Image (cartoon, coloured by chain):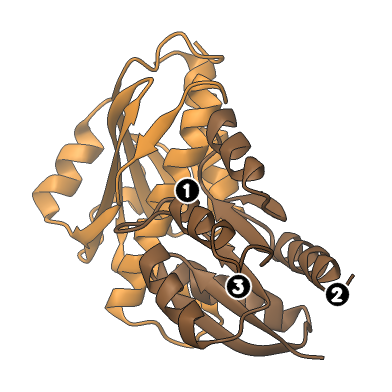
Chain colours: A orange, B brown
Amino acid sequence: MNNDVRQGIEEVVCDVIEIFGFMFGDPADPGGEELIEPGDAVSAEVFFEGAASGRLQVYTSLDAAKEMSCNLLGLDEADNQQGLDTLQELVNQFCGQLLTTLAGTEPTFTLGIPVARRAEQQEWNAALGDGATLCFVMDGEHPLLLRLESEGLEGGPLS
Amino acid sequence: MEFNILLVDDSATVRGLVARALRLAGLPLGNVLQAGNGAEALEVLKSKDVDVVVTDLHMPEMDGLTLIRHLRADPMHKDLPVIVVSTEGGAERIAEARELGISAYLRKPFKPEQVKEAVNSALGVVHE
């Protein structure tokens, strides 16, 4: 991943976190303390196909997903299902924005239905240890890991 | 005068977010009806009066473009204003939606004021 692509992805992710989630997002160092497995890890993923195919996965804490739900819906407290639903929509929006940022608006993509679930500690650690994973911190405390696996996205505007 | 709105999205979060944005904007909302996909939306429209539809494109069972095609083919709903709110950013898909006569196309993530403006504009069309 070249620096322009990385920077493009980071900008999209932080914008979506801010506009959709009403939180501040910042790129983070994978070795940072905030990125240690939170104990209530959740994951969401969405597949895409078309001009390129692949999968986008995110990991965060259930606590963060529920806090985002509260921000969005004006709730004092969100339940687990609301947190997972919000995380599904978050990965959906990341994916839609990233595809047009990386490939432009001409290619056509079809996104799958996003799915969110609880995640195991090993999964979190594997994602964190993967050099292709991008790391973020939301509101200075909530970790977010993002992995984009794709074939065919090379050659877009940021390549 | 209050208006009734139908929110169509497979994400309960997005439906809640749009409803909240409209309430906070002070729009005179009557019934806020919800559906998780296009097929559910058509069921709602059989029995409820709706002034504006806000729909996602990408949904299970029946997607947003199919829903809009059904509406345009139905004499009862052929002029019903439709606002699309979607993650889809491809030019072809947006053009396809516009050809079906939608009132506005908002890309997710959207800002609350964008929804308010789109609904105001769509209602202006209704009351002309």
Which is nearer the N-term, disc 2 or disc 3?
3
Q: Which chain carries label 2?
A: B
Q: How far apart are marks 1 and 2 (CA)?
A: 33 Å
Q: Which residue is painted at 20% across and 64% down in the image?
A: A39
Q: Which chain carries label 3?
A: B
Q: Is mark 1 on a helix, strand or loop?
A: helix
Q: What element carries label 3?
A: loop
Choose mark 1 or mark 2, whichever is in front: 2
Q: Is mark 2 on a helix, strand or loop?
A: helix
Up the image or down, B28 lies above or below A7; here it is below
* Residue A60 located left or right of residue A19: left
Q: Which chain carries label 1?
A: A
Three-letter amino acid code at disc 1?
Gln
> On the image, which quarter does residue A128 sit in?
top left
Q: Distance between the residues labelled 2 and 3?
A: 17 Å
Up the image or down, A69 lies above or below B28; here it is above
Q: Which residue is painted at 31% across and 67% down in the image?
A: A84
Q: Circle 1 is placed at which residue position? A: A93
- Across and down, in percent, residue A125 comes to 17, 44
Local packing at callout 2 (Cα closer than 10 Å; few below 14, some 14-19, many 20+) is few
Please say if the residues under marks 2 and 3 sit with CB atoms less than 8 Å apart: no
Please say if the residues under marks 1 and 2 sit with CB atoms less than 8 Å apart: no
Residue B76: assigned label: 3
Choose mark 1 or mark 3, whichever is in front: 3
Q: Circle 2 is placed at which residue position? A: B127
Tell me whether marks 1 and 3 sit on the same chain: no
* Residue A134 located left or right of residue A38: right
Which residue is nearer to you in this view: A127 or A155?
A155
